[in-house]
Image (cartoon, grey):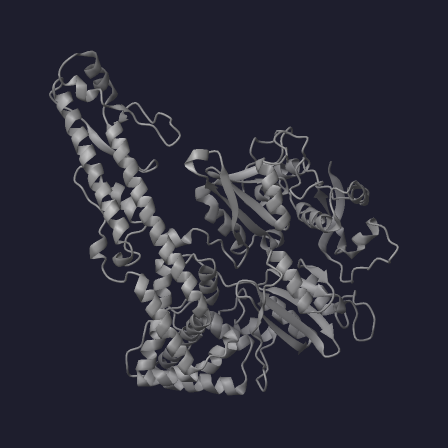
Amino acid sequence: MTDKVRNRNLSLDLGPPTMPSQGDDGASELQQLPIIHIEENEDEVIESSVTSIDQTMITKLLASNVLDDKDLSHILWWNEKLQMCKKPSTVHLIERLDYSNLLGMDCNLKNGSLKEGILYSEMLQFKSKFPRQILLCRVGDFYEAVGIDACILVEYAALNPFGGLRTDSIPRAGFPVVNLRQTLDDLTHNGYSVVSAAIQWCIVEEVQGPAQAQSTKRRFVSGHAHPGNPYVYGLVGVDHDLDFPEPMPVVGISHSSRGYCINMVLEIMKTYSSEDCLTEYAVVTKLRTCRYHHLFLHTSLSRNSHGTSIRGKFGEGGLLLGECRSRHFEWFDGNPISDLFVKVKELYGLDHDVMFRNVTVSSGNRAQPLTLGTCTQIGVIPTDGIPSLLEVLLLPHCTGLPILYVRDLLLNPPSYEIASKIQATCKLLSSVTCSIPEFTCVSSAKIVKLLEWKEANHIELCRIKNVVDEILHMNRTPELKKIVEHLIGPTWVATGLEIDFKTLVAGCEIASGKIDKIISLDCNEDQKVSSFKAIPGEFFEDMESEWKGRVKAIHINDVLTSVDEAAKALHLAVTEVFAAVVFGLKAFVRYHNVEIFYCREQKAVWFKIPFHWFLTTLSIGSPGEEHIELLKYAVDSKGRKVGDELFTTGMVEDALSRYHEANAKAKARVLELLRGLSAELQSHINIIVFSSTLVVITKALYAHVRMGSRWTKTVR
């Protein structure tokens, strides 16, 4: 049913949640939830096709005891998101939702069973742990979402619902496994809307049980994804880089007699920073220049210094109110910092004992930051029609992290002491005569995430080694050593880590040594991919390039030998059968057209023989027929016939199976070594983060100095 409502700006009312009295019943406890504030516009009317949960339904859900107050708050949160859905297909799916469980599944519909042992029952358990994240569950070759999550996928991921728009089954949607990263990137890299930008993803993988119980599958949470925090599971085994965006903090704003306070918590880094004594204009400026994941407003903002409520557009608090009206935010009460940590842990499903490190550095005596108007007018903040100032401050090829550092310097000037260190570094860089390193720039958040999840592949580990080696190189060069010493202070301000020069150098030597001990850095002459004339080279390249050349051979000699022996056995089996088949065909035809075919999808090597020739040979009795009878139709992993022209033999299949088994063991050994190295480097994570930040700062300042010298030559 479609209701006409006035054009409204859905945001949380800038007023504290009313606390219930001791004698209130269950329904009155809902007053603690965020209040939806509806702004009406008399001039415009829009169509609202999604019916919200009314008070009658809320009371009914509470009385039925199917949901507790906490779960009901999550249902209301999702209902607010669903009200923004506009696609007709999504609206039809929403009509089939039932809010008696966190999945939103109607158990009376087809496939809606939540009985123990059923897939959806297991998904409900995962959903209970991460109630405000979209749950994607691996089911065979697909990732599937059901209920509320399926509606969000259809609305924002351009997917069609499973089963079309039939009304007798639960809402389901999904996509092939190969499209996972693309789908997540599309929805989380920048966020298409306020809704998708605030949404998180929880991905559940499945692992096949023992061969004796093939129907048993174990499922586990393999990771989470949201804007600023990509999905990294499985990256340890790939051979490409991951585009890792800058992390997005959770922001909390409060007010006291000293002014406004803004706290930022980074879940990836497990750090937080706090700035207080700010003006209202300064807080609004920081909101506009910061890409954040969630915004929480403390109830202290509900009243200004005069004790009156701030609900108007003008006066104290009015500017912040106007800024927040267009943003999604939630209220919270209690301590502005510790209770914000509680919200962050609930938001990301973190354990209660997780600690956040304070990286706040006292600003001390420093220059005033640029105002919002100045930032937009000179192009520090991207503004339509205004050239970017940052593009003329650094060399054209210097992009990414160095530009972000220079931008942060302009928006948040350091103390005069730190600024003097930066100026002294620029003077040293302008007169350097020795060779300088490449300055490998790696995001600190990327390093922390990959090492914490043990998903750093050999490419990222080599980059980490390059970073610490560049610090060691500068330490060994007298001209560059002074630069590192000068930048210890600015790096401390950027990371909140207090590490002295000697500790930094010693830590870099240890980290570099550990990586050098495991990772293969040479030409891999001892780990060449197998190659045989009879078998297509693409087969061995695809199978063995997934793990060869990543770690030093001394750590995997046994599995290397097993793979080489299995490859030789496969070659012998194929050539022997191939020769026999060709010999049999020659008894009947003058010319044969038999080839050894590699099927990349099935990772198999088969014989490709024209179908009518094979029938002809079977119908004629001769000595060569015994070789032809060895052939059987090739089948895929599910036992289905692949085609009429593809054949194999039992001997080839056995050899192929042994090769795959040896290859899988070798790959598992390599991944085990890489994950073990990541675990070892976690004890040096502060050194690596400090080093990567110092290298980024050095590159930014060097690019600025070089650009300045170009301008000087041009003027002259």
The image shows residue 508 at horizontal and vertical percentages of 38, 74
Q: Position of residue 255 (x, y in %)?
A: 73, 72
Question: Could you tell me which residue is drawn at 28 percent across and 81 percent down?
Answer: 434
Taking the image as shown, residue 362 lies to the left or right of residue 16, namely: left
Residue at 46%, 34% (x, y): give it. Answer: 213
Instruction: Classify 473 as above or below 526.
Output: below
In the displayed structure, 86 sits above or below 471; it is: above
- Residue 311, picture quadrant: bottom right
Across and down, in percent, residue 585 comes to 15, 21
Viewer-closest of 513 and 270: 513
In screen coordinates, is 392 left or right of 645?
Answer: right
Count of marks, rendered view: 0
- Residue 466 visible at all: no
Q: Nearer the viewer, residue 99 or 440?
A: 99
Judge whether 194 appears above or below 640 on screen. below
Q: Compared to 156, does 415 lie above or below?
A: below
Residue at (22, 39) in percent of width and height: 536
Question: Which quarter shows the N terminus?
Answer: top right
Q: Is residue 385 visible?
A: yes
Identify the residue at horizontal 33%, vertical 69% (top origin). Answer: 513
Which quadrant: the C terminus?
A: bottom left
554 or 431, nearer to the observer: 554
- The answer to whether residue 500 is left or right of residue 438 is right
